Structures are given as structure tokens and as C-alpha cells.
């Protein structure tokens, strides 16, 4: 896996960052914003409302942390996972899931740098890593 961030990244990730400031910069639901990189994973923040889309990440676990509000993770073949503020949950690699928020919810995500946040599923909400770094 590459040790460098994609060309075209406009923000430097090596300076200290503040989650509130990062969330202030988020203006679009389901558009993750990369905050930091640790080894081959990114920490991202996002504001979500409504639903994303059903998808899975082959070979890649995905960590959700709710910062504000409530997030429901619909998980194929399992009970819904309801996450309140401060709750953390990891969706295992390959498990189909669909994040849903009835009201606006702020989340942090930890996932490998090459994770496609819709798992490659076509969606108007899909954003490239370059966009998430922008
Ligand atoms: Ni996912």
C-alpha cells in the first residue's frame, strides 16, 4: 500500500487538527472529510442524515464513532445496531451494511486509506478519496 497520500491532496495532514473545526468544514451530508492518517488508515468525520446505501468493504473493517446524535447501522442478517453519542462499533470486513440517521448525526470513521465508502456501490453520495482529502 502506498505510503503517501494521493497527489492533489490540498490539505496537509501532518499539522494538529481539531474535530470541531473539521466538522465546521463539512457542509454536505455523507461527504466524509479526512482528518488524519495513522499508518494505513484514515480518521474521517462526516455529517449524515437519511441513508447511505447498502454496501460492503471486502477485506476491510470499518469503525464508526458517533460524535453527536444517533446512527442506526442496518447490518445484513443481523439486528440493527443503534449507536448513540460516544458509541463505537466496528462493521467487520465483507459484511453488508447501510448507515441510517433519522436526524442529522455527526460521526467519525476509521478505515483503510483505500476504502471506498460506498464499497463501490453506485450512489450519488459516493465521493472519491481525493474529494475527501480536498
Ligand atoms: Ni461502509
Image: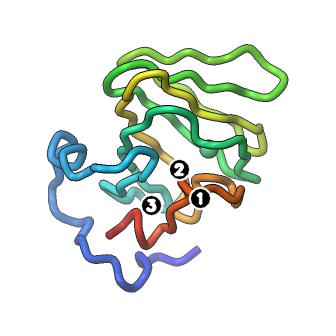
User: In the orientation shown, which residue stands out farthest toward the right?
Assistant: 77
Indicate if the residue with disc 1 has its beta carbon within 8 Å of ligand 1. Answer: yes
Q: Secondary structure at mark 3?
A: loop
Q: Quadrant of the N terminus?
A: bottom right
The quadrant of the rendered image in which ligand 1 is seen is top right
Q: Judge depth for marks 1 and 3 and give the one in front.
A: 1
Give the side of residue 127 with respect to residue 38, left or right.
right
Within 10 Å of disc 3 (Cα), the crowding (few <14, some 14-19, many 20+) is few
Q: Secondary structure at mark 2?
A: strand
CB atoms of marks 2 and 1 within 8 Å: yes
Image point (41%, 68%), residue name? 131
Give the numbered dot on residue 124: none
CA separation, marks 2 and 1?
6 Å
Q: Position of residue 7 (x, y in %)?
A: 40, 85
Image point (39%, 56%), residue name? 38
Number of disc labels: 3
Q: Quadrant of the C terminus?
A: bottom left
Image point (42%, 52%), residue name? 31
The residue pinned by badge 1 equals 115
The residue pinned by badge 2 equals 111
Give the side of residue 94 with respect to residue 39, left or right.
right
The residue pinned by badge 3 equals 39
Q: Position of residue 32 (x, y in %)?
A: 41, 52
Q: Earlier in the sequence, mark 1 or mark 3?
A: 3
Q: Position of residue 128 (x, y in %)?
A: 51, 68
Amino acid at each position: 500500500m502506498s505510503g503517501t497520500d494521493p497527489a492533489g491532496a490540498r490539505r496537509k495532514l501532518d499539522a494538529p487538527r481539531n474535530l470541531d473545526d473539521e466538522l465546521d468544514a463539512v457542509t454536505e451530508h455523507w461527504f466524509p472529510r479526512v482528518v488524519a492518517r495513522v499508518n494505513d488508515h484514515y480518521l474521517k468525520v462526516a455529517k449524515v442524515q437519511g441513508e447511505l446505501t447498502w454496501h460492503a468493504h471486502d477485506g476491510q473493517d470499518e469503525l464508526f464513532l458517533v460524535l453527536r446524535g444517533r446512527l442506526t447501522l442496518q447490518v445484513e442478517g443481523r439486528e440493527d445496531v443503534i449507536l448513540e453519542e460516544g458509541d463505537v462499533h466496528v462493521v467487520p470486513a465483507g459484511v453488508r451494511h447501510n448507515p441510517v440517521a433519522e436526524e442529522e448525526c455527526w460521526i467519525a470513521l476509521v478505515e483503510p486509506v483505500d476504502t471506498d465508502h460506498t464499497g463501490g456501490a453506485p450512489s450519488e453520495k459516493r465521493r472519491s478519496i481525493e474529494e475527501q482529502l480536498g
